[in-house]
Image (tube, rainbow, N blue to C red):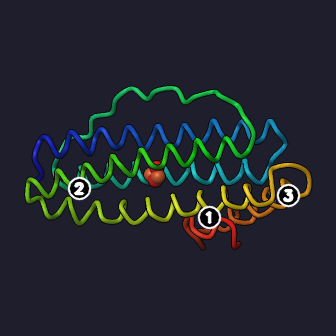
Amino acid sequence: MISNEMARRINAQINREIYSAYFYLALAAQAESMNLKGTGAWFVAKHGEELSHAMKMYRYLIDQDASVRLTEVAAPPTEGGNLFQMFERTLAHEREVTSAINDMVDHALSEKDHATSIFLQWFVTEQIEEEATVKDILGRLRLFGDQGQALLMIDNELAAIAAQMARGTTGTQAATNG
Ligand code: OFO
């Protein structure tokens, strides 16, 4: 059993995870509209991962006899921009999620809710991996640019990683080393 406040926070995070899925689906559509099929596949894979994160939290609430309360999901931004800007937005978004997860851990610890604190450790680690992956991609875009051959190379790499993610042979890690 967890506290009502802890359950409220986990429910809010379910909403953030579903919003993240939506956020990535919008970026996938944008990438596809730019003919970046590999990038589109990568964002679609991210969309699936975020839904799976929401489901982990859903299952945890049920296992803890707490209520799942689904709320309205905001529309994602429709800003457009080039590939570099898309990944900058991705990093900013993931940093916000990391901060929200850290706040939840702080709260769990303040309640001495060890079960929830341990449950959330998976998300803490996942966020480190996700931020590192996006920073790698941005680093390569900075190095090689996001035009011409370099764009094609990055798009192909993202396609390969998306295929691995679909097979479940990698997380979001190693986005740029195949
Ligand atoms: Fe849910 O993993 Fe990042 O946002």
User: Which residue is at a point 66% across and 42% down the rendered structure image?
Assistant: 86
Give the position of the C terminus as an image quadrant: bottom right
Which mark is on residue 43?
none
**Residue 164, percent across and down?**
66, 68
Question: Which residue carries the number 3 mark?
Answer: 150
Question: Which residue carries the number 2 mark?
Answer: 105
N-term mark: 1 or 3: 3
Looking at the picture, which amino acid does disc 1 mark? Answer: Met
Instruction: Give the SS element for disc 1.
Output: helix
Within 10 Å of disc 2 (Cα), the crowding (few <14, some 14-19, many 20+) is many
Which mark is on residue 165?
1
Cβ at disc 1 under 8 Å from ligand 1: no
Disc 1 versus disc 2: nearer the observer? 2
Structural distance between the alpha carbons of marks 3 and 2:
40 Å
Looking at the picture, which amino acid does disc 2 mark? Answer: Val
Q: In the drawing, does residue 84 fall left or right of residue 35?
A: left
Within 10 Å of disc 3 (Cα), the crowding (few <14, some 14-19, many 20+) is some
Structural distance between the alpha carbons of marks 1 and 3:
22 Å
- The picture quadrant where one finds residue 122 is bottom left
User: Which residue is at a point 69% across and 73% down the rendered structure image?
Assistant: 177
Looking at the picture, which amino acid does disc 3 mark? Answer: Ala
Instruction: Give the SS element for disc 2.
Output: helix
115 w.r.t. 9: above or below: below
Within 10 Å of disc 1 (Cα), the crowding (few <14, some 14-19, many 20+) is many
**Residue 60, percent across and down?**
26, 55
Give the position of the N terminus as an image quadrant: bottom left
